């Protein structure tokens, strides 16, 4: 693969400062681990993304789309092909009679959006104000906290449909979704808009998990509220996070909550809080988090994940599932 040549072709329509060769993924994930990406591109617009896909198809390259890197673990050998980091950072606020519609680019960080909504006295997003990710990632995994989830406030999501790309290259797309609105009828890929129901939200999951769709922007329905009360609620959530969650590099909750059990409680009861494998550790502050103590490799973290799963199953009979996505080689 001529990485330099492909990068030069990308610069025909994308600014050179957005394109990196052999980029360490440790710089782009909250775990602070991971090998290099062959090509790493910061995507500032839909036009950028379409051109990246065009070049990738020409060279039969895989594309990996990421947001803030706060829910992924990149393996130590890195990622082949192109990594596209979505940095579409638009925010549009439209007041309605009894509510307000906020259209948010997929690259907007949840914390930044929360601050913008606070300035405008808009309520309903406080629960997500401390989650360290982007709107795109939050929609994909139906992020939630304090009894609320993204599905509760999403109206619709505009995304790029990669069905034709995957049909040619990977054949790992789904066919069982009925598209009701095509926003952009270009050759390929097509921009479509999915309703809340079409996004098939469940606990920490959605239709976007199969990677057929790349999220571009999302419409949220919120309401106006008292600015001081919004600020107070956000501060309460922030304080709670600081007192209950570790401040070492991690990807948030490593494991999903069980249907009839709290996973972190099981891990703690199995005596695993603080357990280490080389540079990876089950957080001493919250057993649901695996953290990088400073010199962990991705393999250290994977080994610890597997050990925790094994011990919990042996002692409780429960098969705990990952919330973090492991990618790369």
Image (cartoon, rainbow, N blue to C red):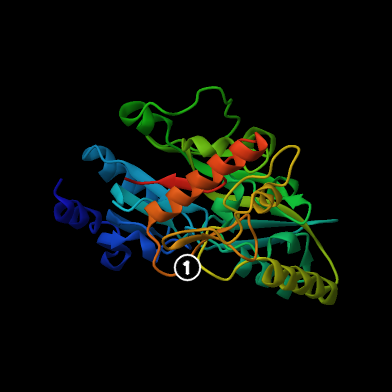
Q: Residue at x 31, y 30 (%)?
A: 169
Q: Answer above or below: position of 29 versus 57.
A: below
* For residue 233, side relative to residue 32 (left or right): right
Between residue 156 and residue 27, name the one nearer to us: 27
Q: Residue at x 34, y 44 (%)?
A: 63
Between residue 284 and residue 39, name the one nearer to us: 284
| Residue 269 picture location, percent across and down | 69, 51
- Which quadrant would residue 10 be assigned to in this image? bottom left
| Residue 256 picture location, percent across and down | 63, 45
Q: Identify the residue at the far top of this view.
A: 176
- Which quarter shows the N terminus? top left
> What is the number of callouts on the image?
1
Q: Residue at x 19, y 51 (%)?
A: 6
- Which quarter shows the C terminus? top left
Residue, disc 1: 293
| Residue 188 picture location, percent across and down | 38, 35
Q: Residue at x 60, y 48 (%)?
A: 139
Q: Answer above or below: position of 293 versus 282.
A: below
- Which quadrant would residue 155 be assigned to in this image? top right
| Residue 132 picture location, percent across and down | 58, 63
Between residue 162 and residue 80, name the one nearer to us: 80
> Counting other residues with Cα less than 10 Å from the Cα at mark 1, is it few (<14), some (14-19), or many (20 or more)?
some
Q: Secondary structure at mark 1?
A: loop
Between residue 242 and residue 282, name the one nearer to us: 282
């Amino acid at each position: 693969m001529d990485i330099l040549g492909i990068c030069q072709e990308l610069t025909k329509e994308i600014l050179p400062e957005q394109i990196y060769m052999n980029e360490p993924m440790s710089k782009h994930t909250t775990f602070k681990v991971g090998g290099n990406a062959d090509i790493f591109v910061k995507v500032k617009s839909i036009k950028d993304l379409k051109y990246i896909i065009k070049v990738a198809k020409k060279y039969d390259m895989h594309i990996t789309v990421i947001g803030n890197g706060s829910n992924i673990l990149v393996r130590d050998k890195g990622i082949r092909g192109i990594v596209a980091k979505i940095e579409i950072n638009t925010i549009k606020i439209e007041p309605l009679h009894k509510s307000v519609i906020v259209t948010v680019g997929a690259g907007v960080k949840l914390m930044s959006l929360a601050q913008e909504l606070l300035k405008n006295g808009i309520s309903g997003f406080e629960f997500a104000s401390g989650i360290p990710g982007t709107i795109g990632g939050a929609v994909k995994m139906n992020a939630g906290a304090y009894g609320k989830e993204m599905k509760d406030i999403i109206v619709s999501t505009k995304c790029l449909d990669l069905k034709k790309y995957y049909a040619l290259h990977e054949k790992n797309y789904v066919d069982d979704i009925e598209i009701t609105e095509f926003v952009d009828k270009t050759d390929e890929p097509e921009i479509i808009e999915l309703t809340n129901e079409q996004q098939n939200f469940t606990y920490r999951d959605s239709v976007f998990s199969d990677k057929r769709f790349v999220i571009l922007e999302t419409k949220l329905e919120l309401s106006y509220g008292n600015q001081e009360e919004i600020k107070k609620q956000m501060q309460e959530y922030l304080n709670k996070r600081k007192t209950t969650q570790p401040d070492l590099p991690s990807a948030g909750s490593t494991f999903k909550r069980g249907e009839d059990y709290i996973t972190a409680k099981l891990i703690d009861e199995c005596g695993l809080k603080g357990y280490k494998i080389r540079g990876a550790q089950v957080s001493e502050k919250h057993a649901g988090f695996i953290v990088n103590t400073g010199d962990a490799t991705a393999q250290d973290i994977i080994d610890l994940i597997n050990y925790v799963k094994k011990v919990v199953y042996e002692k409780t009979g429960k098969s705990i599932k990952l919330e973090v996505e492991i990618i790369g080689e």
